Every structure is written in C-alpha cells, then in structure tokens.
Amino acid sequence: MKMNVNKSEKNVVKYSLKLALCAFFILLATTLTGAFSLPERVDFYPIIPDATPDGSVENTFSERKEKQTVPENSCVEEPAQIVVPEDSKTSAVLPVVPINAEKTVENSIEMSGYETVSVFDVSTGNIAVMPFEEYILGVLLSEMPTSFEDEALKAQAIACRSYTVYKQSTGAYHKNGAQLCTSPSHCQAFCPPESVSPERYEKAKAAVDLTRGEIMCYDGAPVLAVFHASSDGKTCSSEEVWGGKLSYLSSVDTAECFNPTMDITKSYTFSPSVFSDKLGIAPECVSDTTVEKSASGRVTAVKIGEKSVSGGDFVRLFGLRSNSFDMVIEAESVVITCSGYGHGVGMSQYGAQDMAQKGYTCREILAHYYTGVSFGTVE
C-alpha cells in the first residue's frame, strides 16, 4: 500500500531530523569535553536496590577480622585462634533457634553457566579467569580460619558462593570488566590454595566439595550474602547500615558474646587532648559527650556539646572495629570499648562458629542469619 505525504508534512519531518542530529552532536561534544559524564559506579559498597550506603562502620566485608583469621599479606600460616573446650557445645543456649532449615530445600532453584569466574588481582593488576569452585576454595581459605568447625566452614563456603553468584548474575562488575576482585574492601579476599599447608587445604576443600554448587536464594534469585566477624548480641539489618531494605538481611540474635571462649571486645584509650583534637573541639567540651544508639545497639551519632558526628564517621576517625561501642570519660582518659567487629550485616562468623559448636548444621546456621532463604544449586 502506498502512503501519501504532502509537502508540508515532508518539511516537518526534515526539520525534526535536523533537530535530532543537532542534539546528538551537542551531546557528543559535551561528553568528549567532560561537561557531561555518567556518575561512576561505586564498587566499594554492596549492591542494594534503591540504596545509597552512607559508609557507616568502615563499609567493608573483610576488615572485620583484624588479623584474627588470615594475617594481612599472608596466606601461609594458620593464625592463633580460640581454643574450644570439648564440653562447650552444650555450655550455652542460642537465643533464637532456627526452625527446620531443611524444609526450605523444596523451594530450591537450579542455575547454569557458572563454570568460571573472572577475578581482578589487586596485587598484580591482572585479571584471571579461574574455575568457579577453585575460586570459592581460595575465598574460604582467606575469609575463615580452618580451625573453625566443619559446619561453620560449610556455611561460609555457601555464603561466599552465594555472594559470588549474586555479583555475576546482577552484572555488578568492576570497571575493568572483572566480575570480582581480591580486595576485601570491594569483594572477597582470596588466598591461592596452593600457598597453604596440606592440612588447611584439605579441610577447606572438604567444606567446598561437600557444598559444591550450593547457594542461598530468596524469591528465586541469589542472595547478597554479606557477612562479618562478630556482633554483640544482635546483627544489623541492611536498611540500618546501608539504607536499602533486603528482607533476608534482617537483624537477628547472635550468641557469640555469651560464649566464654570468644572474646569479641576491644578497648581503645585516648587522652582528652587527643580525643578533642580528632573531633576538632575544645578539650573542656569532652565531658559533655553523649551517644545515640539504634535498636541493634549500634551507635548512630556521637554528640559533643553542640557538635554531632555520625556513628560511621566516628568509627573511621578513631579506627574502631565497629560502631557497637560504649565510652567512659574520665579526667585523664577517654576509654572506648567496642563489641563485635565489622558492619554487622548478615552472618556473624563467630556466631556461626558458636552455633556449629552447639551442633547446628550449615543450613541451620545460614537459615538463622539470612531470614527466609531457600537453597539452590549452580552448575
């Protein structure tokens, strides 16, 4: 069928095309000159829908251990760890008992296409493509000491695998194209499996092999399985720390603070002059210091007279382990006592160890810390 177009209509079309071309070239020119630019994606934070993380509590997943697990720049020696007496498995009661985590398997999903993973090595500047499960083994060796219980190691392996698949499936890649990197500040730490002792290798590999391909899912999708070293009685929700709500990252009870074999506290002592200098206040104002806390017990703000500092900024300013702390101010000193380590969201590693000591399975541990998840497999 032939379409009839009169002359005036043709002129309108030509004029519209010219305007579109002009707009295109203006946009191109401003882009090249830097006048127009897309905002850079911040890989430093977990990707939470509709969230703009405020950076509270150091914003990292692996800063939490402070050489309690694998020492910095070392993947060879197993660090000194807590010694768990044989009778400690029944010495305490978990505040909240997971409810039959095995039932969640019926909602599992299967995903394919995860044979390899591309990883940016921040120490060499190279991108390596490695077998998926080999990468999970290297992450597990770096993220949790093999002196931990088998079920805790298996839970950590599933969490690391879930986090990896989440990053791959959402396309939250690094600017250089790598899916993940070896920086614990951005993604997950990584320890080359060949660099550790045979004993460490075999124990970690058993945890990876026994959970091979297993991930956590929520509403049919991989979960953002963030984790931290320890919490003082309660974990944080994603909403409290980063501002975006994920239902499976809710605040739950955690019992490592009641375990006599685990010391999760650390004290910092400052002179009033150093304390005031760091905050940029007059020394005489130090005594007028108060703190505000969230429902999970984390400090949200520190107020010194008329000045207010966010909990996250205070943590970074004083180099604290977490924003779960108390202060005692005296004439000659300011003592800050931190409980727990890290951002407090997701699984507590020492909490997982505590549960494993009491006989909980890896799935029960995960179902406790990640609310409402099911379990799926990747191939």
Image: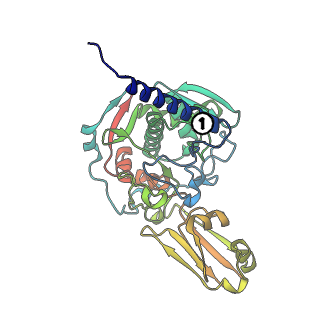
Instruction: State the residue at coordinates (56%, 29%).
Output: 118
Measured as percent of width and height from the top left, residue 308 is found at 59, 75
Q: Quadrant of residue 201?
A: top right
Structural crowding at the residue carrying mark 1, measured as other residues with C-alpha within 10 Å and reported as few (<14), some (14–19) or many (≥20): few
Q: Position of 369 compared to 181: left or right?
A: left
Q: Residue placed farthest to the front in the image?
A: 7
Which residue was labeled with disc 1?
26
> Is any part of residue 202 visible from this angle?
no
Residue nearest the viewer, comparing 313 with 61: 313
> Is any part of residue 66 visible from this angle?
yes
Q: Quadrant of residue 195?
A: top right
223 relative to 320, above or below: above
Measured as percent of width and height from the top left, residue 13 is found at 42, 27
Residue nearest the viewer, comparing 298 with 11: 11
Instruction: State the residue at coordinates (54%, 43%).
Output: 146
Measured as percent of width and height from the top left, residue 180 is found at 56, 36
218 relative to 242, above or below: above
Q: Position of 296 compared to 195: left or right?
A: left
Label 1: state its secondary structure.
helix
Q: Quadrant of residue 219?
A: top left
Instruction: State the residue at coordinates (31%, 49%).
Output: 372
Figure disc tally: 1
| Image quarter (top left, top right, bottom left or bottom right) of the N terminus | top left
The amino acid marked with disc number 1 is Ile
| Image quarter (top left, top right, bottom left or bottom right) of the C terminus | top left
Q: Position of 77 compared to 167: left or right?
A: right
Instruction: State the residue at coordinates (50%, 47%).
Output: 46
Measured as percent of width and height from the top left, residue 29 is found at 64, 35
